Image (cartoon, coloured by chain):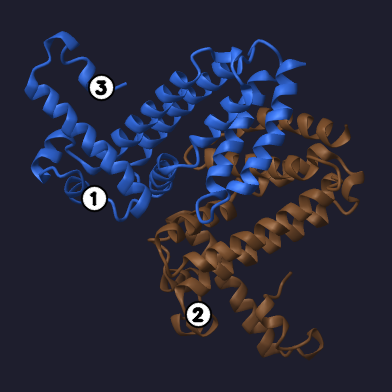
Chain colours: A brown, B blue
Amino acid sequence: MDRSPGERTDRSAGERTPKQDRSRATRRRLLEAAVACLAERGWAGSTVSVVAERAGVSRGAAQHHFPTREDLFTAAVEYVAEERSGAIRALFPQGAAGDRRAVVAALVDLYTGPLFRAALHLWVAASNEEQLRPRVTELEARVGRETHRIAVDLLGADESRPGARETVQGLLDMARGLGLANLLTDDQGRREKVVAQWTALVESALRD
Amino acid sequence: MDRSPGERTDRSAGERTPKQDRSRATRRRLLEAAVACLAERGWAGSTVSVVAERAGVSRGAAQHHFPTREDLFTAAVEYVAEERSGAIRALFPQGAAGDRRAVVAALVDLYTGPLFRAALHLWVAASNEEQLRPRVTELEARVGRETHRIAVDLLGADESRPGARETVQGLLDMARGLGLANLLTDDQGRREKVVAQWTALVESALRD
């Protein structure tokens, strides 16, 4: 989870040098700063320079890691999404044997924090910017598939049964809609009640 | 449905003059052009001038109707949302006696067209622009309440029963999430299956 797909092919863990560790730490700081920046300022306010300053990294070093603005922000959303997915899996090592309510709550939380806010800014920008669109479309598909896989695993959904796949998909669509409802106002009170009711509906649909 | 709340207080229908009719038609052209512009170009690309040109109206006339950019675009999203709500109610005059599948499909359609796209651009812009934020927050709450009321009526949900309110809210959150999933790619095939499954779950939840 702490390496990007691009790095994976360059070297194995055994060959790490202190210089490579520093480079990886710099990369990580840039990615985290990029997501925070996107969440707070939106796409228009997010440039490589702003992120480099926030991360305490020189602009040249930032551009060494990420030659373009598009590289930096798509990599950032992907990195943080992978971190969050990993964290959810780690929270429920027992998978379906665990508490379904807690699993649904953790899945919904994926859509209400700074990561979702950052991803939303990126999606909306991509809908009007041709340079960004294909990359974000591809990223969204990849992150969406991974989230679906986690949800199916942790909820113990048997996708060979009719409707099970769509039940889980609709739950994640609802979580995405709840994230959007939380964009301008704190929607937590309402959200908790909706999630409790939909958890009951999902449980009964997956059990029947 | 063809008058804005602001106009309602100025005069009654009986007093309309040809000049007032022209003024109303101009206003309407501006509002429709504003939503189309917002959907296609996003907030950054949407100015009063661009909308005036698209509507075939002078910039001065546009500013007479809408002194600020914020006035124009919030009024536009509200106007089109009211038009769409009215159209849905008209489609199902028999309300709950009608076809629930068709009602759910029509509700979901509210979130997949240019109106949702325009509203999404406005919401996301409002999350970073202090001038826009309070107005859009208030608009979103008003449109959300009205959509909820329509959904409850047309689905024949009895909100005095535990969980019924949250079942309908979750359905609208899911529709919002489906709208977001449709932003960058045509998601119709997947959406139809999810909607079919969740229509069945919602039906059984409201019936039990």
Report whether mark 2 lies on the same chain as mark 3.
no
Q: Which residue is mark 2?
A: A62
Disc 2/disc 1 C-alpha distance (Å): 34 Å
Disc 3/disc 1 C-alpha distance (Å): 23 Å
Q: Label 3's element?
A: loop
Q: Label 2's element?
A: helix
- The residue depicted at 78 percent of the width and 40 percent of the height is A163
Amino acid at the residue labelled 3: Arg
- The residue depicted at 58 percent of the width and 52 percent of the height is A116
Report whether mark 2 lies on the same chain as mark 1.
no
Which chain contains the residue that carries disc 1?
B
Q: Which residue is mark 1?
A: B47
Q: Is residue B200 left or right of residue A206?
A: left
Closer to the camera in the image, A182 or A168: A168
Amino acid at the residue labelled 2: Ala
Q: Which mark is residue B3?
A: 3
Front position among marks 3 and 1: 3
Amino acid at the residue labelled 1: Thr
Q: Residues within 10 Å of mark 1 (few under 14, many from 20)?
A: some
Q: Label 1's element?
A: loop
Q: Quadrant of residue A208?
A: top right
- Residue A81 location in percent, x, y? 65, 60
- The residue depicted at 34 percent of the width and 34 percent of the height is B135
Which chain contains the residue that carries disc 2?
A
Q: Residues within 10 Å of mark 3 (few under 14, many from 20)?
A: few
Closer to the camera in the image, A123 or A72: A123
Q: Are marks 2 and 1 in contact (CB under 8 Å)?
A: no
Closer to the camera in the image, B106 or A68: B106
